Amino acid sequence: MPTVAELAGQALQKEDGPSKAVIAAQRLDLTFQTNDGPVHALKDVNLEISKGDFVSFIGPSGCGKTTFLRCIAGLEAPTGGEITVNGMTPNEARRARAYGYVFQAAGLYPWRTIGGNIKLPLEIMGFSKAEQTERVGRVLELVDLGGFEKKFPWQLSGGMQQRASIARALAFDADILLMDEPFGALDEIVRDHLNEQLLQLWARTEKTIGFVTHSIPEAVYLSTKIVVMSPRPGRITDVIDSPLPKERPLDIRDTPEFIEIAHRVRDGLRAGHVDD
């Protein structure tokens, strides 16, 4: 079995080749076998994501957005086609620590402090205590939670807990951040604030981000690329490269350019239903 260093080396070599895609899916299919018969979750998904992209996946419930994200992370195995992450299989990429994953719920252990929660993957990976401390302090500052490392999750608001979850995913400095509806359960005011902070974080770190959402305004506001998906079996009905500038104040949502993209996303969602 190749070591983490060997896998990382393979990725660098492959990135210097013809394809510059960080994530690439070709003719991807996934069918779940259930007691009620097969469920076709993804069908013929073709997509390339470049380094530094912020890509949002949007579509109706059950369309395969999260399933596709889990395929990238190696948490689900496609039944057809192929997918690569940094030129490797998703399982190889996971062993090479290529990505951090943020789930819908913060998933913080209540008996651990915020610092202790963020340290957990670093402890598992065998980082020294000194490096754990340095990394925890750094990522807490990145998500504007400096000074909260000794607090417990129940002492933080829902939005702060989600930021702590993002910090945990950033702690081992993976180049890719996968986020599965991290703000879906938060109220609109908190969600707007975290959207602004996430864009600032993305600008500072230059990570490649895959982001699942049900919100058209959120997808348009955050993304350099918006992937619109159809009802199950999940197919891509449109891929929209955003013309919006990288610097995006919240009031950009009132501009004609923003509204035009939002209309195109909505049309893509409708087209998926018609095709279905």
Image (cartoon, rainbow, N blue to C red):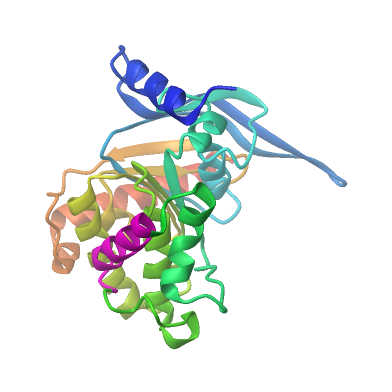
Relative to residue 54, is residue 227 drawn left or right?
Answer: right
Give the residue at x 14% y 57%.
Answer: 256
Q: Residue at x 25, y 50 (%)?
A: 261
How many numbered callouts? 0
What residue is shown at x 28% (from left), y 40% (from top)? 53
Tell me if residue 7 comes above or below residue 125 in the rendering: above
Any part of residue 31 in sight = yes
- The quarter holding residue 86 reads top left
Q: Quadrant of the C terminus?
A: top right
33 displayed left or right of 66: right
Characterize the magenta stretch by its predominant secondary structure: helix
Residue 108: x and y in percent read 52, 70
> Which residue, as the protein is rendered here, is positioned at the far right?
35
Indicate whether residue 260 is drawn in magenta. no
Residue 134 lies in the magenta-colored region: yes
Q: Nearer the viewer, residue 68 or 8?
A: 8
